[in-house]
Every structure is written in C-alpha cells, then in structure tokens.
Image (cartoon, grey):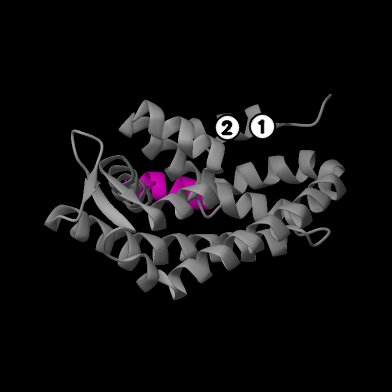
Amino acid sequence: MGQPGTLAVATALGTGGTVATAGALLAGGGLAASLTGNAFAMVSHRSTGKHIEALQELYENHADYEGFPQCGYITDDGDKEETDSSRAGHRVVADHVLPYIIFQKTRKLGRKKVSSIPGISVMETVRSIGHYAHKKYQGEQGSVRNRAAGNLAAHLIECSCDLSRHISNEHLGNERTVYLLGAAQYDRIRSELADKMKSV
C-alpha cells in the first residue's frame, strides 16, 4: 500500500481530523522526501534572506521616497501631483505595510532555516498545517495580510510611487509588476501580493 500523501492530509483536516492525525500521515509519507525538501529549503532560505535585506534597506531609507516627485497621485491626463490622498496612502505603506512585510519575511526565514535541518522538516510541515487550521478555525486566516496587500495594491494603482514599486518588485519581480499595473486590476494585484506575504 502506498504512503499517504497530500490528499490524505487534506482529507484528515477537511473531515474533522486533528492536526495530530495529519502529522502522523506526514510522518509516514514525508520522510522519504526529506533530503530533497531540505535542499530546497536551504535555497529558499537564502532567497528570502536577500529579500529581507532589500526590504530593510528600503525601510531604513524610506524618507528618501517621501513627497513629490517620488510619490504622487496619477491624474486623468497622465501627470502626477502630490495630494492629501497620495500622502496618506504613502504613510500607510511606509509606516505599516513595509514593516509588516519585513516581519512576515523574517518569520518565514526562521521557519525555512528550521526546515533545512534533516529530520525536522517534516515536523515544520506539520506546524504549518496546524497554524493554517488554527487561523481558519479562528476566522482570521489572511485578514491582516490581505489588508496590507490591499493597501499596497491601491497605492500602486492610484499613485506613481517609487517606494511601492520597489516593494512590489521584491515580491513579484519588475516584469510582473509592470504587467499587473498595466492591467490595473486591483483584486488580481492584491491577491498576488498577499500570496507573497505569507509567513509559512
């Protein structure tokens, strides 16, 4: 009989099974892939670390991105101007969204470091599933993350803001950011940013 996989874990959680049940299933099916997962976690760990360094540098120098012409509301004729709305949106991104993203990335870095240790990666997967199940049960899954992504997406669309563009580039890459802004679809941009802000 084959080892239980993702479907079995999802079934255990989706039908009232406990996180412990899911853990038992993962322990049975995940150890064989442990070394592969460890190698992937080490590469991912380095990538996340570089993102944190870039975001931290943005935060430390965020004053350089304040005001016009670094940030301004995009007018109907394509020009940009500093408005009360552009200033308020910028403050939310600089003072709240960016620190939140750095916090999330730092948590993610710690978990990836744990996941790169042989024999522990399976238990980290169990922890991630338990975290997801608990937040879903509490009704707070992704609420803060979605608000942060929504504020960033709205400011990206409404304003020409160097700081917000740099933050988005660190999450999605410059090419993807340019493409999404060209489409100017708020829900799509918010969704992709929120997905990249996850700490698990």
Q: Which of the pair 7/149 is nearer the observer?
A: 149
Judge whether residue 65 can be spotted in this image: yes
Q: Position of residue 75 (x, y in %)?
A: 19, 40
Q: Which of the pair 56/122 is nearer the observer?
A: 56
Judge whether residue 16 can be spotted in this image: no
What amino acid is at disc 2? Answer: Ala
Point out the residue furthest to the bottom here: 60
Q: Position of residue 197 (x, y in %)?
A: 48, 50
Q: Which of the pair 88/192 is nearer the observer?
A: 88
Query: Residue 10 shows which numbered tag?
Result: 2
Query: Residue 25 shows which numbered tag?
Result: none
Q: Which of the pair 75/157 is nearer the observer?
A: 75
Q: Residue at x 19, y 56 (%)?
A: 82
Q: Is residue 183 above or below residue 30?
A: above
Q: Confirm or deny contact between disc 2 and disc 1 (CB under 8 A).
A: yes
What amino acid is at disc 1? Answer: Thr
Q: Position of residue 157 (x, y in %)?
A: 30, 40
Number of disc labels: 2
The secondary structure that dominates the magenta segment is helix
Q: Is residue 59 above or below residue 135?
A: below
Residue 180 located within the stretch drawn in magenta: no
Name the residue beneath numbered marker 1: 6
Q: Residue at x 57, y 32 (%)?
A: 10
Highlighted range, magenta: 131-142
Q: Residue at x 32, y 59 (%)?
A: 93
Q: Position of residue 58 (x, y in %)?
A: 47, 67
